[in-house]
Amino acid sequence: MNVYDGLRIAAMLEHHGFERTESISDADIILLNTCAVRAKATDKVYSALGRIRRAKKPNAIYGIVGCVARESGAGAFRKIKDLNFVLGPQSYHKLPEILNDPNTKLLDINLSGLEKFDELPPITKSPLVAYIPIQEGCNHCCTYCIVPYTRGPEISRPYSEIIAETMHSANVGAIEICFLGQNVNGYKYTDKNGNTYRLSDIIRETAKINSVQRIRFTSSYPTEMTDDLIDMFRTEPKLLPFLNMPIQSGSEKILQKMNRPYDLSGYLEIINKFKSARPDIQISSDFIVGFPGETESDFEQTMDIAKNVKFINSYSFKYSPRPHTAAALMQNQIPENIKSERLIKLDSILNENQREFNLSCIDKTFNCLYEGPDKTGTNHIYRTPYMQPCIVTTDNPTNLANIKITSANKSCLHGEIVD
Ligand code: SF4
C-alpha cells in the first residue's frame, strides 16, 4: 500500500512541476511516507526527520505522510517545530495546499472516506507491476493492530473506478496487477443499480485485459475466503498460484486473545480448498511471536503449523506493543530476549521451508516477470509466479520470459531463458 501511495504522491508532485532528485540537499520538498505497524518503523521516522532537517536547504519544505502522521497528529509539530506538513493516509492528496503557502502548517489526519482517489492525477507510466488499492481500512480489530486506528474502518472503492484504474495502468505499461487492501478479500461494493461486486468479479474482469498476464492480491483474512474467490484459482490461469493468508499464531488460545476468531482446523480446511482448486498453489503466511501471554507450549504449536503446512515466503515478527491497541495493555508481556529467541527458532523453520521449496523448483520452467538488473549490473532478476527472485544472465531481458531453473538456495533461484 505504501509503494502505491508513494507512486501516487510522486505523480502528483510531478504534475505540479517537480522533478525527482536523489539528493536531500537539492530538494525543494521532502516527505517521508511512513508505516506505523511496528514500533521500530515509527521510531525510525523521527531520527530520519532529524537527518533531513540537518541536510536540507533552509527554505525546503518537509513533512510526513501516512500512518505515523495519523498516529502523531499535531504532536509531530511539537516534536519537530519547523516541520511543514503532517498528512494521514487518507489526506495526502492535500499536499499541494502547502505549495501555495509554505509558511503555513498543514495538518490533516482525518479518515473521511476515499476522496483522495478522485483528486489524484492519473499516472502517465506504470511499472510492470501495478498496485491497485480496492479497499482501505479494516473492521477486524485484532488486538495487536494499529491499522483500524491509522487507516480507519473498512471502505471498498467503487468497482467501476477500480476497473478503470486497472485498465489505465495496463495501457501505460503494467503486466502484473496486484490488488491491495488491508482486508482485500473483504471487498464488497454495491452500485446504485443494486449490483454487488466482490474481489472475484474484479479478478474476472481484469483477466479479460489482454496485456495483463499476472494477477494477485494481498492481504487476506482467513475467514473471508469465500468459495467464489477460491474458485477463481480453478478457472482463471492469470491468477498466480501463490497466496498470502496470515495465520499469526498456531495456538487457538493466542488467536482468541488476538481477536482472530478462527480455529486451526478451519484454517487448514481453507488451504485444502485452495489446493483442490489449484494443486500447484503455495501459501505464504504472517506470524507474530511473543504475543502477551504466549507460553512455550503456545509457541510450539506455532512451530508445528509452520512445519506442517510448509508455508513459503512468509513474514515473521516479534510482537511490538502499539498505541491505541488492546494488547498493549495486556498483562504478561513477553520479555524481549524470549521474543528474540522464539523468532530465531521460527525463522529457522520458515527458512528451511523456503530452501526446500526453492530446491524443488530445479529443472522446472516458469513464466517470470522482469524486475531489473541485479546489484552487479551484469545479471537480471525476474520474479517467478511464487515471487521467488530468479537470477538470469542475458543480454536481452524481456518483460516476460520462460525460465528453466538450474540451481537454487534459500534466498533465490538461478535459471536460463528457454523458448
Ligand atoms: S485483519 Fe489485518 S489490518 Fe485488520 S486489524 Fe487484523 S491485522 Fe490489522
Image (tube, rainbow, N blue to C red):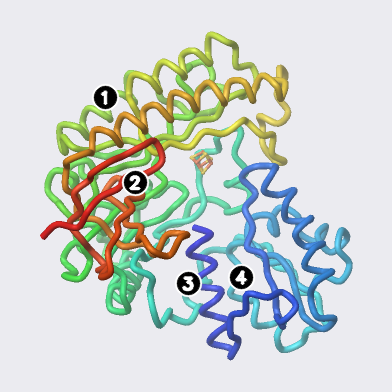
Q: Which mark is residue 117?
A: 3
* Percent position of residue 348, x then y: 48, 25
Query: Which amino acid lies under the numbered mark 2 shown in the image of this protein?
Result: Gln
Q: Is residue 58 above or below residue 150?
A: below
Disc 2 residue lies near ligand 1 with CB under 8 A: no
Badge 4 density bin: few <14, some 14–19, many ≥20, Cα 10 Å: many
Q: How many marks?
A: 4
- Mark 2 or 3, nearer chain start: 3
| Image depth: mark 4 or mark 2 in front | 2
Q: Nearer the viewer, mark 1 or mark 2?
A: 2
Depth check: 311 or 254 in front?
Answer: 311
User: Is residue 122 toward the left or the right of residue 61 in the image?
Assistant: left
Residue under label 2: 388
Residue type marked 3: Phe
C-alpha distance separating marks 3 and 1: 37 Å
Labels 4 & 3 near each other (Cβ < 8 A): no
Q: Which residue is mark 4?
A: 92
Instruction: Please report the residue visible at 13 percent of the width from the left and 43 percent of the height from the top.
Output: 234
